[in-house]
Image: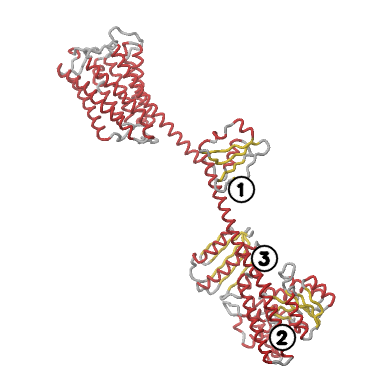
Amino acid sequence: MTAATSTPGRPALQRWGVPALAIACAAGALAAVDLTGAPAVAPTSYAAASTPLLVLALTAGLGLILAGAVLWLVRPGLPAVLAVGAGCAWSADDWVGRASAPDLVRSLAMMASPFLLALLVHLVLRWPGGRTGGPWARTAIGLAYAIATLVAVGQALLRDPLFDRYCWRTCGGNVFLARADVEAAQALHALRLWSWVLLAVPVVAGCLWSLRRVSRPARATRAGVVISGAMAIAAEASYAGLLLLVPQEVPTRGLFAAVFALRAAALTLLAAGLAWAALRTVRTRWSVRRLAQQLLEAPAPGTLRDVLSRSVGDDRIEVAYWLDGPQRYVDAEGHPTDPRPGAHQSVTALVRHGGQLAVVVHDRSLAQTHDLQRELGAAARLAVDNERLRAEGLFRLTDLRASQARVVARADATRRHLERDLHDGAQQRLLAVSSELRLALLDARRTGSPDLAALLEQAGGQAADALTELRELAHGIFPAILTDAGLGPALSTLAVGAPLPVDVLSVTAGRCGPAAESAAYLVVVDGIADAVRRSATYVSVHVELEASDLVVQLEDDGGDRDAGRLVHLEDRVAALGGRLSTQGPVLRAEIPCG
Amino acid sequence: MRVVVADDAVLIREGITSLLRSSGADVVAQVGDADQLLHEVRRHVPDVAVVDIKMPPTHTDEGLVAAQRIREELPEVGVLVLSQYLEPAYAMRLVSDHPEKVGYLLKERIFSGEVLLDALRRVDEGETVVDPTIVSMLFGRRRRLDPLAVLSGRERETLVLLAEGLSNKAIAARLVVAERTVEAHVTQVFAKLRLPESPDAHRRVLAVLTFLRG
């Protein structure tokens, strides 16, 4: 469906030109009839025949003209002009029959009235605008206009109403008459009538057929005008058909009056259809504008509760969002919550398609004076949906973080236990073995068994070596001094034993949670290993407490960092809610102290 | 020599005690935690207390804390702290508070050779004992500019023994030179490394260790 858009700042003439014209035509249509309402004995127009017909005629004519004007204001385009034109062509018949009008006017009106069907056909086939209808529509419209022009001009030049046996509106007054040719005039008249009948059938059929093939929304916008337009065309065709059967037109006779009434009614319906289309356009535009406004004004995420509270004037209002997956309520920040009404409060559920979206806990009086479900409106529901999705996202993120942190903590705890088991278990036993070997050695020496003594000394040496290896192993699994004395001593030992020069330039004396300290220690360990891998010659380390974060910064002079190599560090730091970043030669880890 | 042994692991405690006794030392008490240690030391006033660094209740540095208490209260009692951890920080903490008559040894070494008895003797005589493993770890540290490059071979050897807490006399005995020579070396080393020369032999251990740790 194409809709002509009104561009802002269009020249005033363009915008108001057609309505001004329409008003002139309307004035003309009113002027054409005798509003005193006195039915004439031999009326020269349907409007003069009786009051009801007068009313019908005026309704149809003025209706079309005004509908066209309104349509132009809302949706400027050809259909609006055609509607005004059709209204004028309809009312032209009254001017033809107005005896007191100047002949020129009546002659012009005589030329105008054949165009009525062409205008209707054009309007209906080209509704709602643009290239609808296809090539056959173009043919039909072209044909209609061609015939109308031929009839209008031909009759203007060749028809002398005086010689028309069936003249009733006017029997004279054709100022354009060039040469009176009765046969030609009659032929043209017949052409007009036959063309109206024959053209109407395919046009009406085509209109109705085209309606079936379009989508539902398109059908809704087109049906009103197309169906009423088809009816108007059919009514005109029936009028033409009637004239073919009964050439003498007598407006007071029931049959003619009925057909006229039918035509007027159909045209009025068409006018109503056009006005309705205009109204729909306005309404759609307005609701879209309103939606856009509301979307623009959608409250910032997390603030829906405050916005609601302000607008309903209840500062104890609470909003809780329902999450289907975890089957629980959360607040705007994703924290699990239990929405229970307090004193003087009640709960309203916001549902959509039978599923619960959120609940609002509010003052009881609110429920008595408002229908919160309805009043929150579609736009607020959109905001609610947004908030809910955001809350769900935050909830899942927190959940995930917590689970990751648990995994990391378990891994750390396992290592600590392993180190302690080694210290308290294997190392102690080996020390005991060492001590026993020593005692045995001293004994062997005293009792003068040099071979045994030598063996025992050797065994003692092996035990000592094993102890050294165990010590280094345990330190590699977890440096106990990290838990006991913190990052300072732990990093100092690490620096002393490192395979390349490492300077710990600053270490905060403050303690943090074990997970944070382990992560920080690991960052330094892996950072040093990475520096070695990249052939650095020096590493400097800073560990500071910034706000509530433990910040570890390593700088080395090795080659460019490969981000992929430190992914496990990123994971560990992120699991604790921290951040690992590289800025040139500096590796920076921010870890919540916790 | 009268000794009090403190270690919460029975096997180790027994092992140390047996070893000391078989060498002629008199183990007057064996305890399993710091409170008992202080109690027994006050009661017996031994020559040296041999103390494990990790003891109940926190199993972190009770031994170090107890050592400091003993040194403050009873200066005549030496303390030899035993640790399973090669942590220069602990050694330096011990040495910085009360450098004389203290020692820091790695447990894994005490059952080799005469290490334990030597250390006990040195502590009793008023020296500072720093486990050579710690000293060599500090010496082995990678540095950008080696500040020790200015030292001659002899001076370097002297520095190592200084760090281990040996007195000039002990260094002279170890290097088989005259004590006066050692004194000259020591002066040179301190001058070259720009260390504050301290008449107090014990303070110099801390100075050297601090320098080495960087």
Disc 2 target residue: A440
Disc 1 target residue: A336
Disc 3 target residue: A509
Mark sitting earlier along the chain (2/3): 2
Mark 3 chain:
A
Q: CA distance from mark 2 to mark 3?
A: 47 Å
Q: Return the residue nearer the eye: A476 or A251.
A: A476
Residue A28 shows in the view: no
x, y percentage for residue B130?
70, 80
Q: Disc 2, disc 3: CB below 8 Å?
A: no
Q: Is residue A5 depicted above or below A99 in this figure?
A: below
Q: Dot 1, crowdedness within 10 Å: few (<14), some or many (≥20)?
A: some
Q: CA distance from mark 3 to mark 1?
A: 36 Å
Residue A271 - label: none
Q: CA distance from mark 2 to mark 1?
A: 67 Å
Identify the amino acid type marked 1.
Answer: Pro
x, y percentage for residue A438?
71, 84
Q: Are marks 3 and 1 on the same chain?
A: yes
Position of A82 compared to A547: left or right? left
Position of B208 compared to A98: left or right? right
| Quarter of the figure with the N terminus of chain A | top left
